[in-house]
Image: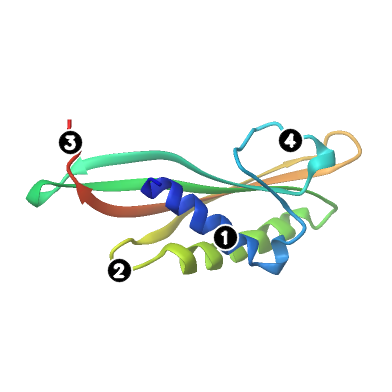
Amino acid sequence: MTWRAGYRSAARAALAAVPRFADMTVLATWSGSVDPETLPVLGVVTASEQQQPTSGGRFEHDTLLQIIVKRQGGDDLEDELDADDAAIIQAVMGAIYTRETPCLPTDMSQMLNGEGRQRIGTLVRSFKITSWRAAPVY
């Protein structure tokens, strides 16, 4: 298992333990298009990683971990997504953050779609996970 797979697995396990997310379908891979019948859903992705050399032949890896929540709601949908965000931060930081592997929230975005009869909201919470690893062998 790669370190990125480990981050995703730890985040999924931590989020599965949060009662707020008990009714959500956790998608193994995220597709931007989710039909309303499947909602609410939660996805965990490692969207990108930057690497740079440091001293001693090691590389600093900055991994972008994103948690995506998509749910239906009413007039309080934005408030529901805010509560989702707070629960995500607490669960993910508790599962991944260590002195050797800082995991910090970086940004959050919400998108509300009110087309049709249903309001659908999407939350994307991003974390930067920093780790130091041996130089790659070629």
Q: CA distance from mark 4 to mark 2?
A: 37 Å
Foreground disc of the pair 1, 2 = 1
Foreground disc of the pair 2, 3 = 3
State the residue at coordinates (30%, 68%). Answer: 99
Report the front residue among 114 and 11. 11
Q: Position of residue 93 (x, y in %)?
A: 47, 65
Q: CA distance from mark 3 to mark 1?
A: 31 Å
Report the front residue among 128 and 109. 128
Residue at which label 2 appears: 99
Q: Position of residue 22 (x, y in %)?
A: 73, 62
Say whether disc 2 or disc 3 marks the residue closer to the N-terminus: 2
State the residue at coordinates (61%, 65%). Answer: 87
Say whether disc 1 or disc 2 marks the residue closer to the N-terminus: 1
Q: CA distance from mark 4 to mark 1?
A: 22 Å
Which amino acid type is shown beneath numbered disc 1?
Ala
Q: Which mark is residue 34?
A: 4
Q: Is residue 18 above or below residue 116?
A: below
Q: CA distance from mark 2 to mark 3?
A: 26 Å
Report the front residue among 101 and 10. 10
Q: Is residue 87 above or below residue 116?
A: below
Q: Position of residue 60 (x, y in %)?
A: 23, 48
Which amino acid type is shown beneath numbered disc 3?
Val
- Considering the numbered disc 1 on the image, is that residue within a helix, a strand or a loop? helix
Q: Which mark is residue 80?
A: none
